[in-house]
Image (tube, rainbow, N blue to C red):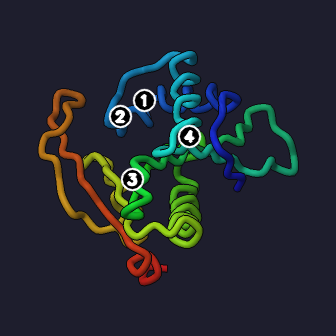
Amino acid sequence: MIYQIATRDDAENINNMRNHLDVRQYLHSPICHTLKNCTEWIENIYHSSSSERIAIYTDPPETETLSYNPFVGLFRIDEIDALNNTCYVGLDINPSQQGKGYASIIYKHMLNELFELRNMRIIYLEVLSHNETAIHIYKKLGFMECGRFPRKIVRFGREIDSCVMYIDRKMLIQNE
């Protein structure tokens, strides 16, 4: 896996992924964006001290195929609090790469980096309650639910809760 700070060069892949219904249905904001909006969003975050975006790619296959897209997804780090050593995280996986185990691999790598290299104390995330696959992955990694925003969003005519989960270094180690 290749992890790199997201730049304008990644904008088209990120925009296509986040506008895809298989991804958008699980985002807190399901609004479709233009490539220009996405590029501006990435550039603004690039200069932020409280947020980061990490673009993730696979190594190219040994035999090149025309349909192969090495873009796996986007790891989001938000509300970086250097005083309290906390942050929020999230991950969007490219629909063509879903179901291959990448979410667990990426989370393990990024959580270890955040705890070991950046000295985070607690890491939080928010996930919509209908995203059962993600919730299963988070629990398997050691995240625990610590709160809920009831009926936070309306999607497909349904009111959906947003679950807040957290993990600390000890919880991650216990689940490795």
Q: Residue at x 23, y 28 (%)?
A: 156
| In the image: residue 79, left or right of residue 42 | left
Q: Earlier in the sequence, mark 4 or mark 1?
A: 1
Under mark 4, the amino acid is Asn
Tell me the SS state at disc 3: strand
Number of the label disc, if any, that sits on residue 25: 2
Number of the label disc, if any, that sits on residue 21: 1
Q: Count neighbours of disc 2 (C-alpha within 10 A) and say few if under 14, some if 14 to 19, many if 20 or more.
A: some
Closest to the camera, between mark 3 and mark 1, is 3
Q: Residue at x 57, y 35 (%)?
A: 47
The answer to whether residue 132 is above or below residue 93 is: below
The alpha-carbon separation of the residues under discs 3 and 1 comes to 24 Å
Image quarter (top left, top right, bottom left or bottom right) of the N terminus: bottom right
Q: Is residue 143 visible?
A: yes
Contact, CB < 8 Å: mark 4 with mark 1?
no
Residue 176 in percent (x, y) is at: 49, 80
The alpha-carbon separation of the residues under discs 4 and 1 comes to 11 Å
Contact, CB < 8 Å: mark 3 with mark 4?
no
Q: Earlier in the sequence, mark 3 or mark 4?
A: 3
The alpha-carbon separation of the residues under discs 2 and 3 comes to 20 Å
Quarter holding residue 102? bottom right
Q: Residue at x 17, y 39 (%)?
A: 152
Contact, CB < 8 Å: mark 3 with mark 1?
no
Check disc 3 and report the residue beneath it.
88
Check disc 4 and report the residue beneath it.
94
